[in-house]
Amino acid sequence: MPQNFADGPLTPRDPDPIELPSVAVLGAGAIGKSLLKGLTRPSVTVRGAIRATCSSASRARELLSEFPQVAVASVEEDLDGNRKAVQDAELVVLAVSPDLVPAVAAAISDSLKPGALVVSVAAGVTLGALQEMLPASGTVIRVLPNMGGDVGFGVTGLGSNERSTEQQLEATADLFRTIGTVVTVRDDQLDAVSSLSGSGPGYFYFFVEQLTASGMELGFSHEQARVLAEQTFLGSAALMHSSGRPPAELLGYFTAPDGTSIRALKQLADAGFKETLLKAASASMARARDIAAETGQ
């Protein structure tokens, strides 16, 4: 039976105490729900209400059951749910899909609290487009979190821009620190963030899948190969996380002259593995820019 690391070295550490203003999370899909988990952690204090909206009544009931301290509304039952949710919120998170951003922005524009900070997680919706959709007096910040936030190991790219203050950037960073690590970059670098950490989990799962397939070619059953590949990666991540050592240092343990691992790593290098990863990341970044162009953003 594979070891479960949920209560072991891969358990995320509680962040330092974080204090946030009233928050409205519009769209409680994967990212929105991750934020609700973060906002309700013991080390997080919210000054005021935590409100959330979702599309269906059944989803609202699920969220209320899991997060009783959050006021959840469904737009299926209340068409004005998004507008009502933002009225007293100092920090508003647009966590809806990119195609819904224009409609949601239009719905809340006149109801935003003066000085409210709006944070968008919608990939492909540019800062310029968001600023046109929302009141000129407000501030908009874009972020790109990834799926690791659901288990407290997310990494979020936070885009700085000339209209956001240090205090606003710090408040946004604090919000996303509740679900992992935050890296502040220029707003125009967020497409590159998407290609690295946004698409990165896909690269990881693909590599695990291919290593599993290689194991089957070497004579293992699918279950045997899957466990060997998956648990190797889990253990490696746990060691890096718990030791705090950088990958280059840990890699040194596998580069003994004429050892088995160095032979395998040389094959990867000779096959252009590094160059292939760069091409993959570049293709992902180019597609993010294409999506923005296609949607008129």
Image (tube, rainbow, N blue to C red):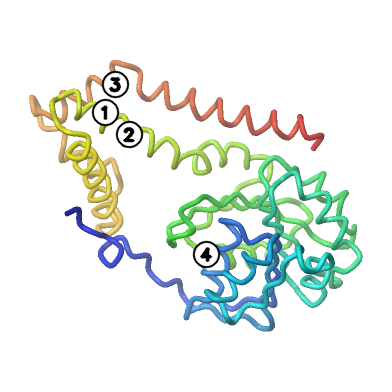
Mark 1 vs 3, N-terminal side: 1
Left or right of 11, for residue 101: right
Judged from the image, the secondary structure of the residue bearing numbered disc 1 is helix
Question: Do the numbered discs 2 and 1 sit on residues whose CB atoms are within 8 Å?
Answer: yes
Q: Amino acid at mark 3?
A: Ala
From this view, report whether residue 256 is shown above or below residue 3: above
From this view, report whether residue 215 is shown above or below residue 228: above
- In three-dimensional space, the C-alpha distance between marks 1 and 3, rounded to whole angstroms, equals 20 Å
Question: Do the numbered discs 1 and 3 sit on residues whose CB atoms are within 8 Å?
Answer: no
Residue 32, picture quadrant:
bottom right
The residue beneath circle 3 is 269
- Comparing 183 with 72, the one in front is 72
Q: For mark 1, does the 10 Å Cα neighbourhood hold few (<14), some (14 to 19), or many (20 or more) residues?
A: some
Q: Nearer the viewer, mark 3 or mark 2?
A: 2
- In three-dimensional space, the C-alpha distance between marks 4 and 2, rounded to whole angstroms, equals 30 Å
Mark 3 vs 2, N-terminal side: 2
Q: Nearer the viewer, mark 1 or mark 3?
A: 1
- Comparing 84 with 119, the one in front is 84
Instruction: Give x and y (percent) for residue 54.
Output: 68, 63
Judged from the image, the secondary structure of the residue bearing numbered disc 3 is helix
- In three-dimensional space, the C-alpha distance between marks 2 and 1, rounded to whole angstroms, equals 6 Å
Q: Amino acid at mark 1?
A: Ala
